[in-house]
Image (cartoon, rainbow, N blue to C red):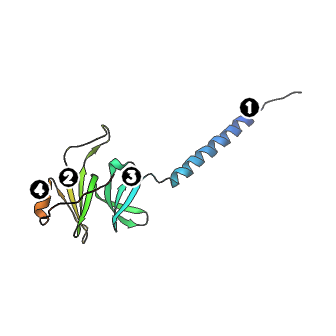
Amino acid sequence: MNLQVDVNQIQKSKMKYFIGFIILLMFESCFMNSHTEKKIIEPYYLIAADTENQMTISKRVNESSFIGVVQSTVIEYTIIENYIIAKSKKYDVRSNTFSQNLIFTTVNLNNGQTRIYLTEKELLAIIKPIKKIKWIKTF
């Protein structure tokens, strides 16, 4: 009984399995949905591309495309009359922390224009007096 092992044949076989595995991984990653998507009010959505610490407000352009409207990490939002109001903080990926400063952004639902306010007092001075804003947490 003489068994000869063909090294080239074994290497080719291993290579076929390896290439098949790589193709399978690439195919699977195309269909994995790694982002969060939650509708606020059509066509505006909360979108987090990788983690919820990167939550933004985006406008849906078509079935699979969005344009960012509020870029900072949105932590809370509300809808008052014809406005989406977002409360956000800058997120530092390296230190995995939020800044202490809040940023308020309004999105006009009629024309899509945005405006940034640096304090809640400044925001409330522009929007007619409201007794209490009911914030909705994003994550």
Q: CA distance from mark 3 to mark 4?
A: 31 Å
Q: Name the residue furthest top.
A: 2
Which of the two discs, 2 and 4, sits closer to the camera? 4
Quarter of the image that includes the N terminus: top right
Query: Residue type at mark 2?
Result: Ile
Q: CA distance from mark 3 to mark 1?
A: 46 Å
The residue located at (43%, 63%) in the rendering is 64
Judging by the rendered image, the residue that carries numbered circle 1 is 7
Looking at the image, do the residues carrying marks 2 and 1 touch, with CB atoms under 8 Å apart? no
Q: CA distance from mark 2 to mark 4?
A: 11 Å
Which of the two discs, 3 and 1, sits closer to the camera? 3
90 over 82 or under it: above or below = above
Judging by the rendered image, the residue that carries numbered circle 3 is 49
Looking at the image, do the residues carrying marks 2 and 3 touch, with CB atoms under 8 Å apart? no
Judging by the rendered image, the residue that carries numbered circle 4 is 121
Q: Name the residue furthest bottom.
A: 110
Residue 132 left/right relative to 68? left
Q: CA distance from mark 2 to mark 3?
A: 20 Å
